[in-house]
Image: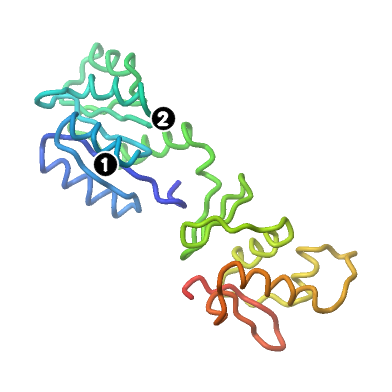
Amino acid sequence: MNGKQTCVLVVDDEQSIRDFLTMGLEDEGYSVETAKDGLSALTKMHQNPFDIVILDVMMPGMDGYECCRMLKQKYEVVVIMLTAKDQAEDTVKGLKIGADDYLAKPFSFMELLTRMEVRLNSRFPQKNSVISKGPFSVDDARHEIMFEDKKLDLTPTEYKLMCLLFDNVNIVISKETIMNQVWGYDYFSSSNVVEVYIRNLREKLQDTEHRYIKTERGFGYKLDVEG
């Protein structure tokens, strides 16, 4: 799920909870911001929409229920509610106003992670297809490749070639293998067709110094995501 980094907003009036979840979620690869109350959460969501909100129920001012209701009215976001209460009516109330899941404090961090992944995969299935390596991200469902957060304008053949290099990072791929994998065994063309397409990719990456797509003379080409 974290191929393209998932953004999490942790909303809780207890500093210790915010710190604990921030440390744990960042260790798992999530991008995390925090808010200490419902109003601050809505402000942050307006400024930078998040994928998921971990939302405490019992907070001063705007409580978690009202915050959840407003979030769900305006945004496509996963909301998991946290509360010290564990009675059925509290869970039902949260789910009725749109919460995706509900955890009673104290809770297991691993259980929270599991619930987050399940809900995110269900709500945003397109993110499952995104894989990132270095500055590159490949979304196979959309047939898109991002480089340094910018979408590359690729032809179908350039996309296939780039995916082949991406799937074999730091592995030298021979011209013959590239021809077979990208154009097919029965394809016949001039011997420099691979060089032409490699040059096109380098131009679109502005890779004039061949930092990313490297030539191994006499062997083939490889993608170095470290640049």
* Element under disc 2: loop
At 56% from the left and 72% from the top, the residue drawn is 206
At 16% from the left and 35% from the top, the residue drawn is 12
Quadrant of the rendered image containing residue 184:
bottom right
Query: Tag 1: Cα neighbours inside 10 Å, few (<14), some, or many (≥20)?
Result: few
Q: Which residue is mark 2?
A: 76
Position above or below: 7 against 153? above
At 61% from the left and 73% from the top, the residue drawn is 202
Question: Which three-letter amino acid code belongs to the residue tagged 2?
Answer: Glu
Q: Say whether residue 156 is left or right of residue 132.
A: right
Position above or below: 19 against 150? above
Q: Position of residue 97 (x, y in %)?
A: 32, 16
Q: Which residue is mark 1?
A: 109
Q: Position of residue 138 (x, y in %)?
A: 56, 55
Q: Say whether residue 190 is left or right of residue 61.
A: right
Circle on res. 214: none
Quadrant of the rendered image containing residue 118:
top left
Q: Position of residue 148 (x, y in %)?
A: 47, 62
* Element under disc 1: helix
Question: Which three-letter amino acid code belongs to the residue tagged 1?
Answer: Phe
Quadrant of the rendered image containing residue 101:
top left
Q: Say whether residue 173 is left or right of residue 190.
A: left
